[in-house]
Image (tube, rainbow, N blue to C red):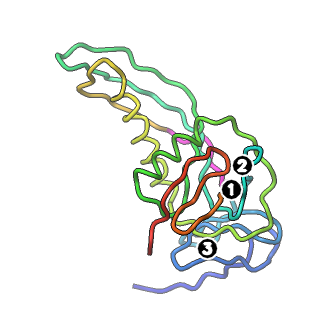
Amino acid sequence: MSLKLVNLDCPTCGSAMRGEGFDTIFFCEHCGHAAVLQDEGLDPIDSSALLPAAGRTVRQWRPAWRIEVDVRVHDRVQAGGRSTPGWEGRRVFFIPAFGLPLDDLTRLSRALSEVAESAAEVPRQPIHGGTLALDDAVTLIRHILIGDEVRRSDKLASVVVDVDVVGRSLVALPFDATERRLTCAVTGVTVRVSSG
């Protein structure tokens, strides 16, 4: 096993990027650009911020993935063996990229993915805690889509869900913070912050 030190200078402007212990996602506090830690170093990635809803307080920003996917739901079979129609289409999901319990991560992802997107420039403030890899975010998207199919009223027995990523970027999410909870300033959803 070899250890490689990676320079955490912004690939766009050269300023030092700061993070926490297990961060793999970084936002530059100087220019607002984002980067993801890969085996070969920092890989720049498009970034923006979601605007808070009117009247909501913002005390901190956290990272999330914005992932555009082509979805194909097929081989849908009801209990009893009857095939039902699937569907396909393009969707955009926002997946928080910081530590949350799975139920809160799923709930916040659903809520964020249902609101109209209003993007802005990334704030020049600390945005830390980015630990969720793109592959894991795509797995959560598949989980959300299968959950949506299961909740339909036709007693689903089996289904196949294909998800192909067609675009990805990072977004800064605004939150109001209190003790061990965060309230999303976009959706109003409150989540628990994972410890550790």
Q: Splitting the image into 4 quarters, where does residue 136 fall?
A: bottom left
**SS type, badge 2:** strand
Instruction: Reply yes or no: does residue 26 show up in magenta.
Output: no
Q: Residue at x 49, y 51 (%)?
A: 137
Count neighbours of disc 1 (C-alpha within 10 A) and say few if under 14, some if 14 to 19, many if 20 or more.
many
Q: Amino acid at mark 1?
A: Pro
Name the residue that disc number 2 marks. Answer: 50
Image position of 121 (left or right of 186): right
**SS type, badge 1:** strand
Give the quarter of the figure containing the C terminus.
bottom left
Mark 2 and mark 1 residues within 8 Å of each other at the beta carbon: yes
What range is drawn magenta here?
164-173
Name the residue that disc number 3 marks. Answer: 41
- From the top left corner, tell me how far across and down residue 117 is, in percent: 70, 39
Count neighbours of disc 3 (C-alpha within 10 A) and say few if under 14, some if 14 to 19, many if 20 or more.
some
Q: Nearer the viewer, mark 3 or mark 2?
A: 2
Q: Check the image and report above or below for 192 versus 67.
A: below
User: CA–CA distance between discs 3 and 2?
Assistant: 27 Å
User: Which one is earlier in the sequence, the residue at label 2 or at label 1?
Assistant: 2
